[in-house]
C-alpha cells in the first residue's frame, strides 16, 4: 500500500510536501565517521566523573545538514554557534519557534568505560532568552547502563524530546540575537572515553 497524503481538496504531493517542510525539519552535525573516518573523542577523567561535561565534536566538511523549518532559517541563517572544540560547545538556536513548537535531539556514539557496572547519562542544557522566567535548566535521559564489562564499547543512541515553553521561547526577536539556546552534555559514573559520531536536532514549528 502506498503512502496516503491528506490535505485540502485538490492538494497534491507536490504542494503538500513543500508545505510540510516549512514547519518540520532538522539540523544534523555529523563527524567523519559517516564519511569513512571516525568520531570525536571526549575523555572522562577522574575529575569529570559524575559531572556534566560538554561534548566535543569535529564536524566533517560534508557533515552539516540544515533542513530546519523555514521560520527558523528566516530568523537565524546558521542555526547554531560554537566550534565543538573544548570550551566552545555547539549551541543550537531556538530562533523562529514559539510555544506551539517542539523538538528532539538524537545522539549517536560509543562509550568505553574504564570500570564495569557503570552508567552514562545525556542531557540538553537550555539557556533561555532574557525574557525567560527561569535560568538554565536541563532535560536528562539515561543513555547506557554498562554492565557487560569494562574497556569495551557500548553503543549509545539516546533521543531527548522537549517542547518550547515560555522559559525558552524566542518571542519573535528580529535577527534572533536573544533566542533560547540548548547544548548537549554527558555525565558518566566512571572514567572512560565517549566517541561522538553525530547529533541531529529535529524541530516542528
Image (cartoon, rainbow, N blue to C red):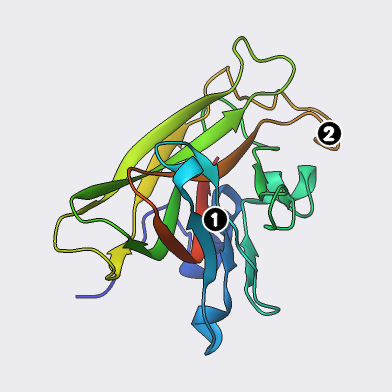
Q: Secondary structure at mark 2?
A: loop
> In the rendered image, which residue does mark 2 sit on?
177
- At horizontal 67% and vertical 49% (from top left) the residue drawn is 89
Tell me, yes or no, if residue 49 can be seen here.
Answer: yes
Q: Identify the image quadrant of the N terminus.
A: bottom left
**Total label count?**
2
Tell me, yes or no, if residue 104 can be seen here.
Answer: no
Farthest residue in the front direction? 46
Near-viewer residue (173 or 186): 186
Q: CA distance from mark 1 to mark 2?
A: 22 Å
Farthest residue in the bottom direction? 36
- At horizontal 15% and vertical 56% (from top left) the residue drawn is 147
Residue 183 screen position, x and y as percent = 58, 42
- At horizontal 69% and vertical 45% (from top left) the residue drawn is 72
Near-viewer residue (91 or 44): 44
Picture disc at residue 101: none
> In the rendered image, which residue does mark 1 sit on?
25
In the image, residue 128 sits, relative to residue 116, either above or below, namely above
Residue 175 screen position, x and y as percent = 85, 38
Q: Secondary structure at mark 1?
A: strand
* Residue 182 located left or right of residue 106: right
* Residue 1 located left or right of residue 101: left
- First reached walking from the N terminus: tag 1 or tag 2: 1
Amino acid at each position: 500500500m502506498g503512502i496516503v497524503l491528506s490535505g485540502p481538496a485538490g492538494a497534491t504531493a507536490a504542494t503538500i510536501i513543500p508545505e510540510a517542510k516549512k514547519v518540520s525539519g532538522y539540523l544534523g552535525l555529523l563527524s567523519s565517521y559517516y564519511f569513512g573516518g571516525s568520531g570525536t573523542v571526549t575523555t572522562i577523567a577522574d575529575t569529570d566523573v559524575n559531572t556534566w561535561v560538554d561534548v566535543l565534536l569535529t564536524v566533517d566538511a560534508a557533515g552539516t545538514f540544515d533542513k530546519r523549518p523555514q521560520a527558523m532559517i528566516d530568523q537565524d541563517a546558521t542555526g547554531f554557534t560554537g566550534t565543538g572544540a573544548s570550551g566552545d560547545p555547539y549551541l543550537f538556536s531556538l530562533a523562529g519557534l514559539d510555544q506551539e513548537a517542539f523538538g528532539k535531539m538524537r545522539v549517536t556514539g560509543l562509550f568505553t568505560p574504564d570500570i564495569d557496572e557503570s552508567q552514562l547519562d545525556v542531557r540538553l542544557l537550555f539557556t533561555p532568552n532574557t525574557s525567560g522566567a527561569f535560568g538554565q535548566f536541563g532535560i536528562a535521559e539515561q543513555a547506557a547502563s554498562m554492565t557487560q564489562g569494562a574497556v569495551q564499547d557500548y553503543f549509545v543512541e539516546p533521543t531527548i524530546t522537549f517542547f518550547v515553553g515560555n522559559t525558552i521561547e524566542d518571542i519573535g526577536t528580529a535577527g534572533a540575537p536573544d533566542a533560547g539556546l540548548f547544548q548537549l552534555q554527558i555525565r558518566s559514573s566512571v572514567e572512560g572515553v565517549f566517541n561522538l559520531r553525530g547529533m541531529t536536532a529535529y524541530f516542528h514549528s
